[in-house]
Image (tube, rainbow, N blue to C red):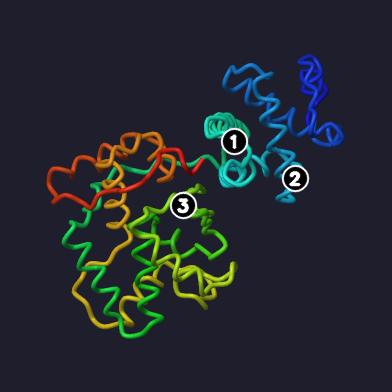
Amino acid sequence: MTNSDDRESVESEGFAPIKAARYWEILEPVVAAAVTATARRTGREPRALYSVATAFVLWAWQTKGLELDAARMFRRWVVEEFVHRGMDSFTRGSRATYRSVLLAIVDAVTPPSEQPFPIPRSDPTPPYSAAEIATLRSWARAQGSAVRRRDASVLLAMGFGAGLATRELLSVRAGDVDVRGDDMHILVWSGRPRLVPVLPAWQPGLRDALSERDPDQWVFRVGRTGVRSAQVTDFLHRGHTTELDVRPARMRTTWLLTHLQAGTPPRDLLRIAGLEHLAALDRVRGVLPLRAPLPALRSYAPGRSE
């Protein structure tokens, strides 16, 4: 809830919502709290924040059923889902503008105790070469059963095709994969919430798996009762013994380099990778001259996941 000064600031701006008019008495305290905190933190004009914040709060309350509380509503994962699924009639430019404003609000209303801590620097994990990727594809096809072949294919698809970290790919359920024609996106909920476009070359394995999954089932290793990082290692050890270095971390580095080589704008890549600073890309980019060329990206349109 907001104090009287916050409510007066809304009225002084003369903001009059149209679509949310009938609910404004209920929504106003939440919108006012978010707008006031953001205006004070960033120096932005409140009038530039009201319409965006109101549209988002109305959607989060009506569609997602979230509690009317600014700190609970303004979360990165909710913003990403709103931009992708709640703004179908908006242009890509408008979605990008809304997303930028909403993430500024998220930063302003997130309690200090929940702010992310910086991750210490470390040497980048080495990527796979094109020859190694081909070997891993052959490894997936050579698994001893249809179930293991499917899981191996899914593991490579989410690693090489979407750059997901181990716990992220283990947390993906079939309902988190959005397929619209030739486009495929994975909604990541854990750790670094975001929407990730899947590279076209890696989509077939996921499409096959989705055809056999209910929305609430895990995409990788269906039937699990939870998420543990060791589940990938367990899958590898249960199959035929292999000397191959099968690691999602290396797949993620390879995915990042594939985008960098293809010219994906750094800011777009930071967003879909769940990274915050360009320095992270600089460290990965440093290994480019040391490796054989990676497969072409084919058809990725920057900004498509917005």
Q: Position of residue 184 (x, y in %)?
A: 47, 54
Q: Is residue 7 above or below residue 229?
A: above
User: How far apart are the two marked residues, 1 and 3, measured between alpha carbons?
Assistant: 28 Å
Q: Residues within 10 Å of mark 2 (few under 14, many from 20)?
A: some
* Amino acid type, label 3: Asp
Q: Is residue 25 above or below residue 133?
A: above
- Mark 3 = which residue? 183
- Mark 2 = which residue? 61
Q: Is residue 128 above or below residue 68?
A: below
Give 277 or 135, whichever is nearer the viewer: 135
- Mark 1 = which residue? 106
Give 165 or 138, whichever is nearer the viewer: 138
User: How far apart are the two marked residues, 1 and 2, measured between alpha carbons?
Assistant: 16 Å
Give the residue displayed 58% in from the left and 41% down from the top.
Answer: 83
Give the residue displayed 61% in from the left and 35% down from the top.
Answer: 90
**The N terminus appears in which quarter of the rendering?**
top right
* Amino acid type, label 2: Trp
Q: Give the SS element for disc 3.
A: strand
Horizontally, is 250 left or right of 49 in the view?
left
